[in-house]
Image: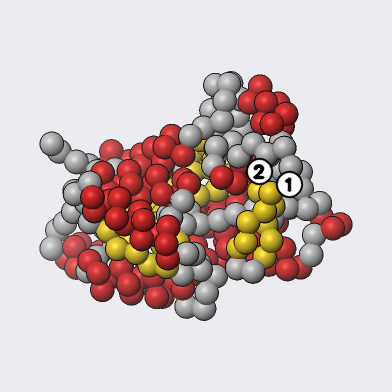
Amino acid sequence: MNRNLEGKVAMVTGAGRGIGRCIALKLANEGAKVVVNDLDAAPADEVVAEIRAAGGQAVAFASSVTAPDFGTNFVKATLDAYGAIDIIVNNAGYTWDNVIQKMSDEQWDAILDCHLKAPFQVLRAAQPYFREVSKAEAESGKEVFRKVVNISSISGTQGSTGQVNYSAAKAGLVGMTKTLAKEWGRMKVNVNCVAFGFIATRLTQPVKEAKTIQIEGKEIRIGVRPETIERASSEIPLGRPGTPEEAAGSVYMFCIPESNYVTGQTLICGGGRGGF
């Protein structure tokens, strides 16, 4: 069976759970060797085990994307493990919401660091590798495409009440994507963006009472009230939230050879919501 990503090496941040996990599994199922990053070692190891059990190749890299030198260390770990980088998916993230007059500097900095600064540092660290391999390939007459997929949100493309930090970070990723598409075209690196709408994950699960999780010592509220989910679903032309597998599929489209002449684009994966 021909697999579209046979022999490629993919780096995926936030790949231990939810959408990131499905992205890692999808890329591995299509033949890619995957470096699975997550804040916590246990879920990253579980995804690696799942990939290996299905006959794929993967290694874990447990670290916060906001840790000092994360980008440099993530790139180094990938090159040490597999000697190449073909796909980078900047997926890691969470929300820490509030209206602007109640939002602390800590909330603002935490979300901007995770969603915008971390992808910047990963891509900055990867640039020397892309430059060297693309130069060698060009000199030998080869044209080899590599892929970057940044994960944004319709909160970044159209705004979202109570999410000034998250919306600003996700909008920034769209700008970063467009700029790097221009800078990296000569290296044959496609840089694109997927903006998710309402995707059903543990962060958006239906809850009747407040529920929180711990992220780097911070108590982060998760979940959505059932009536809010029902109202949001009624505004989605396809009538329901998307699944993590469907979200992963939209990322996959930017990773395959068929998208080699597509760069600098933002694809909205929202069931019709946020795209009109």
Give the residue type that dot 1 points to: Ala
Q: Secondary structure at mark 1?
A: loop
Which residue is rendered at x = 13% and y = 36% of the image? 1
Q: Which quadrant would the C terminus be assigned to in this image?
A: top right
Q: Is residue 256 above or below residue 214?
A: above
Q: Is residue 173 visible?
A: yes
Which residue is rendered at x = 46% and y = 70% of the image? 63
Q: Which residue is mark 2?
A: 223
Q: Are marks 1 and 2 in contact (CB under 8 Å)?
A: yes
Q: CA distance from mark 1 to mark 2?
A: 8 Å
Q: Position of residue 151 (x, y in %)?
A: 50, 50
User: Which label sits on residue 210?
Assistant: 1
| Residue furthest bottom as drawn | 68
Q: Quadrant of residue 158?
A: top right
Which residue is rendered at x = 81% and y = 51% of the image? 99
Mark 1 or mark 2: which is in front?
A: 1
Badge 2: residue crowd in 10 Å (few <14, some 14–19, many ≥20): some
Q: Quadrant of residue 138?
A: bottom left
Q: Position of residue 184 (x, y in %)?
A: 38, 60
Q: Nearer the viewer, residue 35 or 179?
A: 35
Q: Secondary structure at mark 2?
A: loop
Q: Position of residue 245 (x, y in %)?
A: 42, 37
First in residue order: circle 1 vs circle 2: 1
Q: Position of residue 171 (x, y in %)?
A: 62, 51
User: Which label sits on residue 170?
Assistant: none
